[in-house]
Image (cartoon, rainbow, N blue to C red):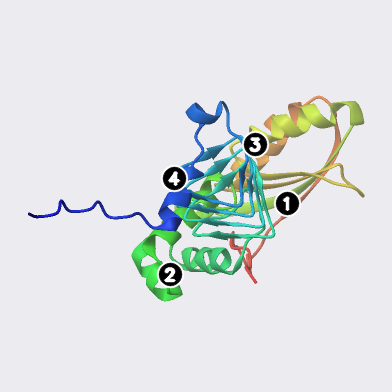
């Protein structure tokens, strides 16, 4: 007489993972997972203490003394642990982030697979890192034409003095001018420093006379025309 086959026994890590799985439906908004694992699922609104989150997300909570593998921590903190394949929101750039940014500065169209091969990490890691850097406003991947590409062959630095009650109003008006590429409020001789680009000298004159000259609150200005551009770059050095 044959004996029925026995069901395979689950491993202890798998049992622990399931026993300690927390989701928003079962926990009523999320409760703490203490001394255990969370596998393939999110922890919402609650901390993970002395444990591990594998392949999931901790949203609005805290991971203390543990590890988050393959997922971000959103709105929370990781204390005494590690984020693998992701980065906690608000965390400073790490070595992988810096190397990814440096590669993209040289070629913004570089495929994630090539970056991953160069850095000896997975393509998934690179894809997540780039996505996080963009979503957190740390980088932008865009085409930036040079001024000459759009016919702006003349540039000038303009120092502007204003009556202080009009400082914000004038700076906002300057920001809306298509010729203006930089507006900074400053100390010293001028209240506002502007960098602007023009098609030619007549365009420059029209801007000074018809736009700046009609702004109420400007008391004086000084222009410095740029004769030669030695360096023009949007790249920030990543150590």
How far apart marks 3 and 4 lie (CA) works out to 71 Å
How far apart marks 2 and 4 lie (CA) works out to 29 Å
Secondary structure under tag 4 reads helix
> Can residue 145 be seen here?
no
Residue drawn at x 27%, y 55% is 8
Q: Nearer the viewer, mark 1 or mark 2?
A: 2
Q: Nearer the viewer, mark 4 or mark 1?
A: 4
Q: How many residues crowd around disc 4 within 10 Å: few (fewer than 14), some, or many (20 or more)?
A: some
> Can residue 70 be seen here?
yes
Q: How many residues crowd around disc 2 within 10 Å: few (fewer than 14), some, or many (20 or more)?
A: some
Residue under label 4: 18
Closer to the chain start, of discs 1 and 2, is 2
Residue under label 3: 206
In this rendering, position of residue 73 left or right of residue 211: left
> Looking at the picture, how far across and down is residue 173, in whole percent?
70, 29
How far apart marks 3 and 1 lie (CA) works out to 16 Å
Q: Residue furthest front?
A: 1
Q: How many residues crowd around disc 1 within 10 Å: few (fewer than 14), some, or many (20 or more)?
A: some
Residue drawn at x 59%, y 69% is 95
Q: Kindly indicate whether the residue at mark 1 contacts the one at mark 3 (C-beta within 8 angstroms).
A: no
Residue under label 2: 121
In which quadrant of the rendered image does the N terminus lie?
Answer: bottom left
How far apart marks 4 and 1 lie (CA) works out to 64 Å
In this rendering, position of residue 39 left or right of residue 33: left
Occupied quadrant, residue 124: bottom left
Q: Kindly indicate whether the residue at mark 3 contacts the one at mark 2 (C-beta within 8 angstroms).
A: no
Report the front residue among 191 and 11: 11
Q: Kindly indicate whether the residue at mark 4 contacts the one at mark 2 (C-beta within 8 angstroms).
A: no
Residue under label 1: 157
Closer to the chain start, of discs 2 and 3, is 2
């Amino acid at each position: 007489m044959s004996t029925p086959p026995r069901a395979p026994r689950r491993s202890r890590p798998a049992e622990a993972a399931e026993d300690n799985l927390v989701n928003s439906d079962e926990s009523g908004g999320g409760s703490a997972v203490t001394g255990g694992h969370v596998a393939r699922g999110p922890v919402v609104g609650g901390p993970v203490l002395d444990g591990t989150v594998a392949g999931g997300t901790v949203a609005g909570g805290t991971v203390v003394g543990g590890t988050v593998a393959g997922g971000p921590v959103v709105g929370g903190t990781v204390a005494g642990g590690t984020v693998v394949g992701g980065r906690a929101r608000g965390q400073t750039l790490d070595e992988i982030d810096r190397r990814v940014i440096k590669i993209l500065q040289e070629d913004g169209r570089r495929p994630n697979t090539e970056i991953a091969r160069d850095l000896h990490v997975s393509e998934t890691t690179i894809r997540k890192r780039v996505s996080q850097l963009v979503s957190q406003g740390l980088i932008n991947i865009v085409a930036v034409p040079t001024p000459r590409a759009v016919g702006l062959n003349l540039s000038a630095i303009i120092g502007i003095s204003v009556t202080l009650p009009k400082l914000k109003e004038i700076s906002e008006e300057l920001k809306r001018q298509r010729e203006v590429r930089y507006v900074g409020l400053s100390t010293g001789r001028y209240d506002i420093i502007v960098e602007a680009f023009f098609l030619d000298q007549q365009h420059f004159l029209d801007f000074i006379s018809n736009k700046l000259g009609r702004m109420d609150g400007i008391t004086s200005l000084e222009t410095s025309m740029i004769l030669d551009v030695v360096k023009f770059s949007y790249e920030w050095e990543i150590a």
